[in-house]
Image (cartoon, rainbow, N blue to C red):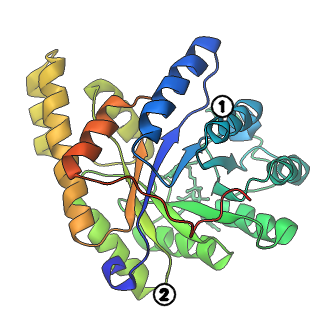
């Protein structure tokens, strides 16, 4: 169990890179507001095939210019080794020491998966090319990745990423604390010895949440679906219910020893800030994850 490991707690906030000047301006405001909570780092997603490469880097540099730690994601599907090498060089040149390494998902209809098939190959490549330069986070799935052959295979595939040199993991979001507790126990039984930080999805828009969850395999328990459906277009009731639900999930996870929380903010500060305040969290910083030097 993660609680027995005494890993330092890590609180982090994820953004996606804005594509427009208006989106960039909005993200500046969001970042400023969330920075007051003192997260350990912000992370910025990276589109499959390098589609957001420049925007991801720009967002990371801007967050750092505001005095915060920031980690760019990197995804390998649809990329050549040469592309990935160039991205790593760029990250190194900017003094970036922290990344989230993923396979990514190709847009449907695309067939060329490139030179990397799975994220464990990307992690091995990063280590081969850059040694210990990066603190590498990877993704994992308490409710099983939708393309996995079985739960057991998915767990072993997660282990491959750790064996390839990843330092820590962030989960896909989930709404059942038990799926996380069960997963971390299974990881421990397989000798996976890294912090596994729960990914948290605040709930604002039910139809968007259903769409995301269908794609990524996150389960929305029946009783939650029915409650949300019952609210119909009453967005303020959905918001209030979602806040209560996600806050109590976070509370349960932290009380049981989860080593922090990673919020999928969708570039909005409101819900994340309220959950943070309700949990009574303090501004948080420690230097155990090397990000910039
Ligand atoms: P993998 O670990 O490669 O797993 C993908 C599937 O292949 C799984 O079913 C696994 O069981 C199977 N598998 C893995 N290794 C092997 C192997 N060696 N042999 C056979 N089967 C194997 N997507 C983006 O495009 N950009 C982002 O920035 C991004 N950020 C994310 C951040 C987090 C915290 C999370 C949880 C997800 C993120 N995603 C992002 C989504 C992610 O790319 C998808 O979930 C993707 O489908 C899987 O990525 P992965 O790195 O977990 O892949």
Q: Quadrant of the N terminus?
A: bottom left
Q: Earlier in the sequence, mark 2 or mark 1?
A: 1
Note whether residue 47 is visible.
Answer: no
Residue 38, image x, y percentages: 44, 49
Relative to 95, say whether 277 is above or below. above
Dot 1 falls on a residue whose secondary structure is loop
Q: Quadrant of the C terminus?
A: bottom right
Relative to 275, say whether 259 is above or below. below
Instruction: Name which residue lies at 32% across and 38% down.
Output: 273
266, 159: nearer the viewer: 266
Ligand 1 shown in quarter: bottom right
Relative to 188, say whether 32 is above or below. above
Q: Are marks 2 and 1 in contact (CB under 8 Å)?
A: no
Left/right placement of residue 21 relative to residue 51 reads left
Residue 289, image x, y percentages: 59, 66
Instruction: Name which residue lies at 71% across and 30% down.
Output: 55
Instruction: Name which residue lies at 28% across and 28% down.
Output: 204
Which residue position holds label 1? 109
């Amino acid at each position: 169990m993660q609680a027995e490991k005494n890993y330092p707690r890590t609180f982090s906030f994820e953004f996606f890179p804005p594509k427009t000047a208006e989106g960039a301006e909005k993200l500046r405001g969001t970042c400023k507001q969330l920075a007051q909570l003192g997260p350990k780092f912000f992370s910025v997603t990276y589109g499959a095939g390098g589609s957001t490469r420049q925007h991801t880097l720009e967002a990371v540099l801007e967050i750092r210019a505001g005095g915060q730690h920031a980690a760019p994601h990197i995804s390998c599907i649809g990329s050549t080794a040469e592309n990935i090498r160039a991205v790593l060089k760029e990250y190194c040149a900017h003094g970036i020491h922290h990344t989230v390494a993923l396979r990514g998902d190709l847009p449907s209809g695309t067939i060329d998966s490139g030179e990397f098939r799975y994220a464990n190959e990307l992690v091995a490549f990063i280590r081969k090319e850059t040694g210990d330069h990066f603190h590498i986070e990877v993704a994992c799935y308490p409710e099983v990745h939708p393309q996995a052959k079985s739960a057991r295979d998915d767990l072993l595939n997660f282990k491959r990423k750790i064996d390839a040199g990843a330092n820590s993991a962030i989960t896909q979001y989930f709404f059942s604390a038990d799926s996380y507790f069960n997963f971390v126990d299974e990881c421990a039984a397989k000798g996976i010895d890294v912090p596994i930080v729960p990914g948290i999805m605040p709930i604002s828009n039910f139809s968007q949440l259903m769409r995301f969850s269908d794609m990524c395999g996150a389960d929305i328990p029946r009783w939650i679906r029915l409650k949300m459906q019952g609210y119909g277009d009453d967005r303020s009731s959905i918001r209030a219910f979602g806040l209560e639900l996600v806050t109590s999930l976070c509370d349960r996870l932290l009380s049981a020893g989860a080593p922090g929380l990673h919020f999928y903010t969708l570039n909005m500060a409101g819900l994340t800030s309220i959950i943070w305040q309700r949990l009574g969290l303090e501004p948080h910083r420690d230097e155990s994850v090397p990000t910039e030097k």
